[in-house]
Image (cartoon, grey):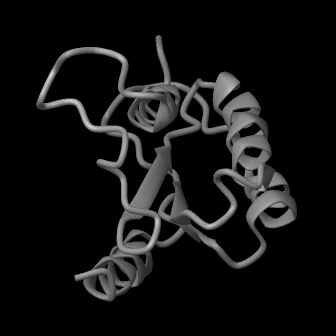
Amino acid sequence: MVSRTLIIIAIILWSCRSNDLDNGALQADSFNIEKDFLLVQYDYKTDVDDLHTIAAFFTLMSDPNFSRINYHAVAGTYGIQSGLYVPPNPLLELAFKDNWTDAHNNTQTAVEQVRSKIATTF
């Protein structure tokens, strides 16, 4: 299964590339680093590859071209599927410090924290 985060990263990279297509809807500046907010969500439910995605996303955010992006990571955004949850907390703390929310252990707090962060971008 392709991780949603990889799709989000691909969209960001696609929107930041040069606008060499003759397509009025595709603009290289469609993601505004000064105003926009990127919310990345990882489920970690039977997806060990999500741990790799954290490393990839952290690497992107460490690049000077992306380091000013306002983002927040959410852990535990799974539905009703069965399988084991892979606890990512130590890696999230190492990669994102306080810039992540634990929806697996406290869904209501996570929703409130994310809602607050999103509200500040409008």
x and y percent of residue 50 in the render? 64, 32
x and y percent of residue 115 in the render? 29, 79
Q: Is residue 93 above or below residue 75?
A: below
Is 43 in front, or is 55? 55
Residue 14 sits in which quadrant?
top left
x and y percent of residue 7 in the render? 43, 26
Q: Is residue 29 left or right of residue 18?
A: left
| Residue under the image location 47 percent in, 15 percent down | 2
Q: Is residue 42 above or below residue 75?
A: above
* Quadrant including the C terminus: bottom left
| Residue under the image location 50 percent in, 40 percent down | 43
x and y percent of residue 15 in the render? 39, 35
Q: Is residue 22 left or right of residue 52?
A: left
| Residue under the image location 69 percent in, 61 percent down | 67
- How many labels, in total? 0
Q: Is residue 54 above or below residue 82?
A: below
Q: Is residue 112 left or right of residue 105?
A: left
| Residue under the image location 36 percent in, 74 percent down | 35
Residue extending furthest left? 24
Is 36 in front, or is 48? 36
